[in-house]
Amino acid sequence: MSRNLNKISSYENIKSLFFNNMILMFGGFGGVGSPPTIINNILNWGTRDLTIIGNDTGFPHIGIGQLIAENRVKKVIASHIGSNPIAGRLMSEGTLEVEFSPQGILAERIRAGGVGLKGIISDIGIDDPYLNKEKKVIEIEGHPYLVESALSAQVGIVLAKKADPFGNLVYDKSARNTNPLVAMASDITIVEAEEIVDTGELDPEQIVTSGVFVDYIVPSKGVDWKWIWE
C-alpha cells in the first residue's frame, strides 16, 4: 500500500516497471475498462514473454488482445478467450499457455490475492476433468470442494474515469468491472486516468478504490468506445 500523497507520473517514469517475463494483471471486460494508453506503451517498449491475468483476451486490435496479436504473451489466466481468435489459434498451436477459470471464480481469486488470502474453495467444476485438473480437493461437511489458488501480479494496470493525486478512483459505469480487484491484487498498481482532479474534488461516496492501493497515475490520451457500436 502506497502512502505517497502525489502519485501523478509520466509514461517515461513508469517504463522501467515493465520487463520481460513479468506477471501483469489488467482490468477490463472485452477491452472496456482496459487502459489503452498504457497497453500501447507496453507494445512500443517491446516488453514480451508476459504472463497476463484478467477477465479475457480482448480483441486482436482492442485492449490487451493487441499484446497477444504481437506474440508478447506466453501465458494467459482468464475466463475466456473467444473474442480473440488469435489467442485461440496460438493456444491450439501450443505457443500460448491458457489457464481457464470461471469468471466468478477468477474474480474471487484476484480478490483473495488482494486481501492476503492464499486461496478459496469452490465446488464449481468439481465434476469437470478440465477445471479440476491437478487441483487439490478437500471435503467439508461431507461435500468436496476444489482449492483455487489466489492470484496476484507484479504490476496491475487499471483504467479510471477520475483520479485525485493520492490515487482515489472513480470508475465509469460498467468500465469499472474488475479494475478495483486488480488495483488491490498487484504489488505495483498503475492507473490510467481519463481525468485527474484536485484533492478534495471527488465525492467520498463515489470513490471505489482508495488511493492506498495506487502507486502511479498517468493521464489517458483518450478512450475510443466507438468500436462497441460498429
Image (cartoon, helix red, strand yellow):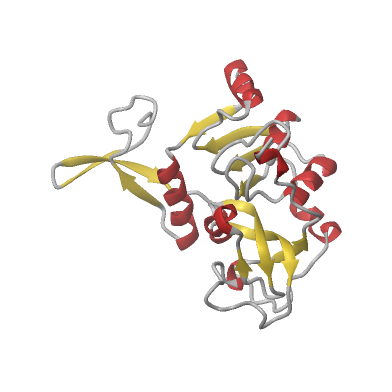
Q: Position of residue 37 (x, y in %)?
A: 78, 50
Q: Residue furthest top?
A: 93
Tell me the quadrant of the picture where the C terminus can be found. Answer: top right
Q: Position of residue 144 (x, y in %)?
A: 22, 39
Q: Position of residue 23 (x, y in %)?
A: 63, 45
In this rendering, the answer to whether 176 lies above or below 47 is below
In this rendering, the answer to whether 224 lies above or below 171 is above
Q: Nearer the viewer, residue 68 or 133?
A: 68
> Residue at left 69%, top 76%?
4
Tell me the quadrant of the picture where the N terminus can be found. Answer: bottom right
Q: Residue furthest front?
A: 229
Q: Position of residue 48 (x, y in %)?
A: 74, 37
In this rendering, the answer to whether 157 lies above or below 196 is above
Q: Nearer the viewer, residue 109 or 209?
A: 209
> Residue at left 78%, top 53%?
222
Left or right position of 74 against 174? right
Q: Quadrant of residue 149?
A: top left
Q: Quadrant of residue 173?
A: bottom right
Q: Nearer the viewer, residue 181 or 17?
A: 181
Q: Quadrant of residue 145?
A: top left
Q: Residue furthest bottom?
A: 200
Label count reads 0
Left or right position of 107 against 124? right
> Residue at left 66%, top 24%?
86
